Image: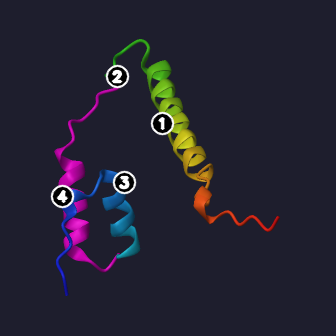
Amino acid sequence: MSQVDYTKMSDAELKQYFLKHRGNKSAFQAYLDRINQRPLRVIASPDDPDFDQKVQAAIQEKLNAAKIDSNLKANVVLEAPDDNVVDNG
């Protein structure tokens, strides 16, 4: 069996691969290693007077990004190349 090169996968591709192959411990570990390399984003400190607004804005940003990603995937259109058009006239 050939070895899968997780380093050549994007984050999204690696996540999808891991979700489709849940029993693959090396894929799971590669995914965990990758997400743990990301710097942590601090939205607001608990004593920030705008804490609630900043958290709500961050949540809305994530929801909007997920919606855009979902719409892009849903709008993929497969078109036949022009050389496959048959003219019966």
Q: Which residues are magenta?
A: 22-44
Task: State how far apart marks 1 and 2 are (Cα).
Answer: 16 Å
Residue annotated with mark 2: 44
Residue annotated with mark 3: 12
Q: Are marks 4 and 1 in contact (CB under 8 Å)?
A: no
Q: Is residue 85 above or below residue 21?
A: above
Kind of element beneath mark 1? helix
Name the mark on residue 7: 4
31 in the magenta segment:
yes
Q: Are marks 2 and 3 in contact (CB under 8 Å)?
A: no
86 in the magenta segment:
no
**Pair 4/2: label in front:** 4
Tell which of 84 and 54 is nearer to you.
84
Q: Is residue 31 above or below residue 72?
A: below
Q: Residue 43: x, y in percent?
A: 35, 26
Q: How busy is the neighbourhood of tag 1: few (under 14 within 10 Å), some, or many (20 plus)?
A: few
Query: Residue 32 is drawn in which quadrant?
Result: bottom left
Residue 78 appears in the rendering = no
